[in-house]
Amino acid sequence: MSLRSRVTVREEPGPSRDDGLVAVYRAKLLEEIDLAEMSSLAAGDRRVRLERVLGHIISREGPVLSSAERSQLVRRVVDEALGLGVLEPLLADASITEIMVNGPDAIFVERAGRVEQLPLRFASQEQLMQTIERIVSTVNRRVDESNPMVDARLPTGERVNVIIPPLSLTGATLTIRRFPRAYTLPELIGLGSLDEQMLMLLSAFVRARFNVIVSGGTGSGKTTLLNALSGLIPPHERIITIEDSAELQLQQDHVVRLESRPPNVEGKGQITIRDLVRNSLRMRPDRIIVGEVRGGETLDMLQAMSTGHDGSLATVHANTAEDALTRLQTLGSMSEVDVPFEALRDQINSAVDVLVQLTRHADGSRKVAEIALLVSHGREQFRISTVSRFVPHPLGHDHRVRGTFEHLPLPRRVAERLYVANEPIPPAFGVIDGIDGRNTREAIG
């Protein structure tokens, strides 16, 4: 299977007889090729060889086709024989970040944050299942009625999720997520995700070893921002990254990457995020980065943050900064250790310093909606102080989201911590007297 990113896909519905021709000439091609010889060739040579053989078959046996129809037929037959059929050109299109197959007749993609349906289809449910089986076989997994869900990372980095009937009522469903390249914080400024003053503040927080939680909804850019923030960690520090599917692309030299493992077909051998967080504490980390906390490992992560592993980073699914705190509390309670909610609140108040809330807007743009400081202590109710936020303007005729980033003074206690770490305070923020600062609000927890 080849997952490439070189060319732009051409969406060609093609003549109605295409599906039948593809099946016929795929069978003829398999009859004429030497499988042993093919297996000895490199992937690129294998494709060239198949295209040449198929060209001879079409010239010899027909049908009569135009040059465009002939090229399209050759490409589709070879894609069926070697790769993922109608998905091959989509995987070759670098502008596509997600492919969603809802049964054989409905194929959607995401480009530039927008989802669109393509005029493509699989010939049958059986052909879709063959494609799915070819994908999951590359990671030694299987999908059938006894194992109808598969979530895996392909060797080339894409994340694949499969769910089939009877769980899926629309037919076999396949989702392929291609992770974007690593962006730097200056590049994110160019995309409008944040501004220069926010970059300076976040840089100071990371270098001063504040514990940072990046929160947001699905597809809001949490991993992208986490990766960019990790680039601010000094190169001499030992970093342990822990993820379900390895997405982070850290550039430092001293990085240990850990990835969880699902159970095998017998239901054994699972290694969870929690197992990895616990193990990482024995690996002498300077910082721990958890791609996403979603269960009992949250408690272990909070304990690590508050017991000598300052400067750690993690992401969590939440729609607001307040929701992020209550979600951390709920996830921490999922541990097998019976910890009262009040004690969990104490853990969060002592562990978390900064909340960075991301939002994905209707036009597909992703922005830092808020940077907030957790200023509560002990077992008291969560209180957060906003120091930066995005204020959207009314939508214009082009339906693009525009707005301004507002900045508020930092609480004196936070400013003093930055001063001790020899980190300058960006001029747009300033400092306000008092412990909590201005624009502090209470979050339920």
Image (tube, grey):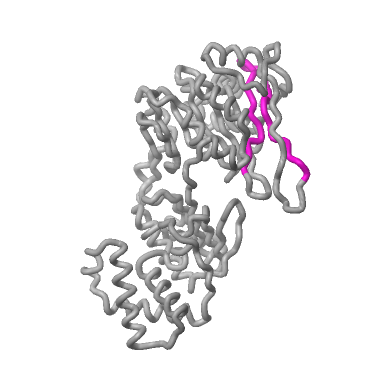
Image point (39%, 51%), residue name: 154
Residue 308 seen in the figure:
yes
The residue lying toward the viewer, choosing from 358 and 275, is: 358
Is 384 covered by the magenta stretch? yes
Residue that appears at 37% across and 71% down: 78
Q: Find the magenta span and give its range.
A: 366-394
Residue 294: horizontal and vertical position, in percent?
A: 52, 37
Write down the quadrant of residue 234 in the picture: top left
Q: Is residue 333 visible?
A: no
Verify whether residue 149 appears in magenta: no
From the top left corner, tell me how far across and down residue 43 is, in percent.
Answer: 30, 62
Q: Quadrant of residue 444?
A: top right
Q: Position of residue 256 (x, y in %)?
A: 36, 32
The location of residue 427, given as percent across then percent down, is 65, 21
Up-down relation of residue 291 to residue 95 (above or below): above
Count of all numbered marks drawn on residues in the image: 0
By secondary structure, the bulk of the magenta-drawn segment is best described as strand
* Quadrant occupied by the C terminus: top right
Q: Residue at the location (22% across, 64% down)?
A: 40
Q: Which image quarter is the N terminus in?
A: bottom left
298, 318: nearer the viewer: 318
* 3 in relation to 10, above or below: above
Where 148 falls versus 233 (above or below)?
Answer: below
Question: Residue placed at 26% from the left, 75% from the top?
Answer: 33
Vertical placement of 176 versus 273: above or below?
below
